[in-house]
Amino acid sequence: MRIREFAKFLDDVENRRKGLRIWIVLVLIWSITRTFIVGAFFHKYGLNTFRYFLIDFLSSIPYAYASAHSLLALYDKRFKAAYGWIGLTVISFYLPDLYIIETSHHVPPSIYTGFAIALAVLSLLALTQWRAHRNK
């Protein structure tokens, strides 16, 4: 999709609503998938997979909503609103990870290292995308 076509797409309110619903569904599907992945790695170190799922799934809803609204606010050049949405995005993004760190015990350093690298890469990717949209 070309930039002008994409901008035209974002200017339509109904397209924004559809995009938000699709984004929420995708984030929730990823939450379910991630629960199986995290559960496989951290269950043997004391992580309650069901509690993790509840925290992850329930924090995914505000994450999806806030992340979409932060990008739309940046697109609309409503920077004060964007920063509020970004704050909620960051909190809801890291909440499940904080649960992993808090409840897992005797985790080998290699797993924490891999976990930290994955978090760093995903955080860097999100920051890069945010900066790209902010500068448009």
Image: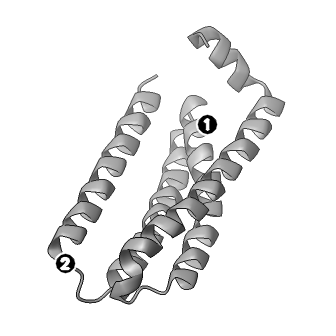
Q: Earlier in the sequence, mark 1 or mark 2?
A: 1
Number of the label disc, if any, that sits on residue 88: none
Residue drawn at (53%, 55%) of the image: 84
Quadrant containing the N terminus in the rendered view: top right
- x, y (%) of residue 16? 74, 34
SS at mark 2? loop
Considering depth in this image, is 64 or 118 the residue closer to the camera?
118
> To which quarter of the image does residue 30 belong?
bottom right
Amino acid type at circle 1 is: Leu
For the residue carrying disc 2, how many other residues have a C-alpha within 10 Å: few (<14), some (14-19), or many (20+)?
few
Color encoding of the figure: one colour
> Is residue 126 depicted above or below 32 in this figure?
above
> Is residue 30 depicted above or below 49 in this figure?
above
- x, y (%) of residue 32? 60, 64
Considering depth in this image, is 1 or 46 the residue closer to the camera?
46
Residue drawn at (62%, 9%) of the image: 4
In the picture as drawn, the residue positioned furthest to the left comes out as 109
Disc 2 designates what residue? 108
Decide if residue 75 is on the left or right side of residue 10. left
- x, y (%) of residue 72? 61, 36
Residue drawn at (35%, 36%) of the image: 128
Residue drawn at (64%, 18%) of the image: 7
For the image, the number of numbered tags is 2
SS at mark 1? helix
Q: Do the CB atoms of the residues marked 1 and 2 lie less than 8 Å apart?
A: no
Decide if residue 119 is on the left or right side of residue 39. left
Amino acid type at circle 2 is: Pro
The residues bearing labels 1 and 2 have C-alpha atoms spaced at a distance of 41 Å
Number of the label disc, if any, that sits on residue 72: 1
> Is residue 106 depicted above or below 72 in this figure?
below
For the residue carrying disc 1, how many other residues have a C-alpha within 10 Å: few (<14), some (14-19), or many (20+)?
some
Considering depth in this image, is 70 or 83 the residue closer to the camera?
70
